[in-house]
Amino acid sequence: MNGFCTDFSDAYLSKISINENAVKTEIKDLVRKSVEETLNELLDNEAEELTGAGKYERSESRKGYRSGHYTRNLTTTSGNVKLSVPKLKGVPFETAIIERYRRRESSVEEALIEMYLAGVSVRRVEDISEALWGSRVSASTISDLNQKAYVHIEEWRQRSLHGKYPYVYIDGIYLKRNWGGEFENVSILVAIGVDEEGYREVIGAAEGMKEDKESWRSFLIWLKSRGLDGVKLVVGDKNLGMCESVHEVFPEARYQRCTVHFYRNIMSSVPRNRIREVTMMLKAIHAQESKEAARKKAKEVVEKLREMKLNAAAKKLEDGIEETLTYMDFPSQHWLKIRTNNVIERLNREIRRRTRVVGAFPDGNSALMLVCARLRYVAGKDWGCKRYLCMKYLDEAAE
């Protein structure tokens, strides 16, 4: 008997659930029709006010005449509605009703763009738009919206730079592009500056094709033409031509080779079972309290590496150590953050996370725009609003 009651109860609840869904559908349809009727009535009232007369009304004060209407689809939060927009002769029909919905549509467009640029996949954006907006936004529509966003992104990329940027970090990131059915690398060069107040700012991003001297030179000249000034230290990896380009474009600036990249370069000549030991030895160099002490420690490590039969690693350390000690000529309070390129490496990881969803880009400009969009998005959050360095120490050192 209890089993029969349970089966009956389940069937009854299932029927109620089905009826509830049907009721919800009916209510949504009623709301949509109500919205449609209300909007059309408002449009007719607006037309009547503009013409100075109702439909078929004879009046000497009439300012214009109706000439039928045209149908326009409008997506609202209640679903798709059909508007019968009046056509008028003798007076332009500018409706406030449509403008209000245009503003709402614009806000939805901005939300879709932000979702896409924040790292949400196109398929997910389609699903979210259907759930929240009442209709599915196609991938082609999202692409069109992004083209609109690219205009604003390009304005941001080409903006003028004001003030001085004592510290500048530069690096490149490789992405894939599809060229004539073949995949090849495209390089995006990125620069981050720390201003006189100690705040970080993405000051430049450009397509570099290859990270060669000409690419870096053009990139730095472009930054300078936009107003980059007051550069005292440039932090970067030892890419081809980067160091030479820095001294050529900003002769007053010093160059700091990223210590993390330097360690990686040395480790490529170290057996795996010795990596931990050698890493500790290298870190001891940059843990010294002065440049003189660091140089002395570096000589000791070079001799130790030769005793360990790691001659290639010893040679790399001996040849490159001086480039990694430039930061010691600046305030010690800044050493930890100006001896590596970590600030830009973290952004590069964020870029890779987003571009991994895309895969291969159709061209270099598409890659550049998405990278810039991501940089702009991240920089507009807490990243760019938190003081990165206390610059009073640099001012005191200059006095």
Image: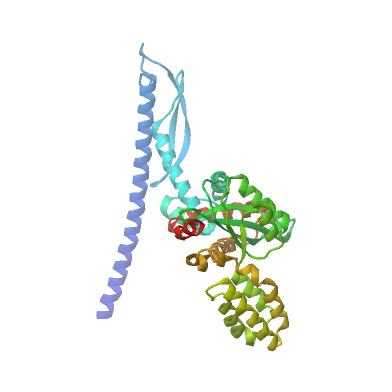
Camera-side residue of 192 and 347: 192
**Total labels drawn:** 0
Q: Quadrant of the N terminus?
A: bottom left
Above or below for 219 versus 268: above
Residue 33 % position (x, y): 37, 42
Residue extending furthest toward the front: 399
The part of the image, by quadrant, that contains residue 22 is: bottom left
Visible in this render: residue 334?
yes
Q: Is residue 178 left or right of residue 387?
A: right
Residue found 32% across the figure and 63% down from its top: 17
The part of the image, by quadrant, that contains residue 330 is: bottom right
Visible in this render: residue 115?
no
Camera-side residue of 212 and 255: 255
Residue extending furthest toward the top: 60
Residue 287 % position (x, y): 53, 76
Residue found 72% across the figure and 59% down from its top: 212
Camera-side residue of 46 and 186: 186
Above or below for 64 versus 43: above
Visual colour scheme:
rainbow
Residue 206 % position (x, y): 63, 52
Residue 101 % position (x, y): 41, 39
